[in-house]
Image (tube, rainbow, N blue to C red):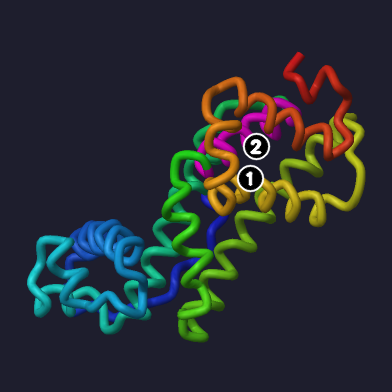
Amino acid sequence: MSTAPAPRVIAAQIKDEALVQARRARIAEAAARVFREKGFHTATIRDVAEAAGLTQGTLYNYIRSKDDILYLVHQDLTARYTADVERAIEGLSDPRARLRAAIRAFVRAMRERHADIRLIYQETHALGRDSLHAVLAQTDAFIRLFGGLIEAARRDGMAIDGAPRLAADIVTFLPVMLALRRWRLRHALDGPEAEDELVAFLLRGLGCPEEIADGS
């Protein structure tokens, strides 16, 4: 049930689509490591190629520029945490359980992928216009996924304060603090009990009754 828009088209010299997707995932993973270590502007395409185990010439079969690479890093990360949420709610029919499971999955993703989250927040400004628009569209689709879950829970009788879209924006931003303020929160928010506490905090913030927020 993917809600993501079609990704921005990046011309490839290779016709095997499965190979292109696999190589681009490999490039995105390697680039994230390089950009975290060196910063986007300092890192070179050669650095990324070496980290991916490819020659620079081979890399150009799959991308055209550093902007393409940074876009792939954004696209790959957003696709991963979107998939985390979609897997978490798959098979659940109760709207309240779906909302709680989605929030928990996103909180966990922000904890586990904190380094990559910080990277994309730091380097988004470096994206070209087309790449930025594509990234924002992907993020908007993720927020709309949560908006739908919140609206479904409200229709099911859950008392939720505020407009679903605004609530979705807030719910999908607050967990990002786990990455952006990791220097302060890493000890306080490590472990399953802290995860439970943050999920309950977000649900209470939506106006959910205490027993629902606490998973009762």
Q: Secondary structure at mark 2?
A: helix
Residue at the spot 69% in from the left edge and 31% down from the top edge? 199
Q: Amino acid at mark 1?
A: Pro
Relative to 126, is 91 on the left or the right? right
Does the stretch in magenta take in 88?
A: no
Q: Secondary structure at mark 1?
A: helix
Cα separation, mark 2 vs mark 1, equals: 9 Å
Give the answer, above or below, for where 206 lies relative to 82: above
Q: Main secondary structure of the magenta part?
A: helix
Relative to 96, is 87 on the left or the right? left
State the residue position of label 2. 103
Residue 39 drawn at (x, y percent): 36, 70
> In front: 175, or 24?
175
Residue 101 drawn at (x, y percent): 63, 30
Marks 2 and 1 close (CB-CB < 8 Å): yes
In which image quadrant can residue 196 be found?
top right
Residue 59 drawn at (x, y percent): 16, 74
Q: Amino acid at mark 2?
A: Ile
Position of the C terminus, as image quadrant, is top right
Relative to 158, is 4 on the left or the right? left
State the residue position of label 1. 175
Position of the N terminus, as image quadrant, is top right
Q: Magenta residues, as a range?
A: 95-110
Residue at the spot 24% in from the left edge and 63% down from the top edge? 27
Give the answer, above or below, for where 158 lies relative to 127: above
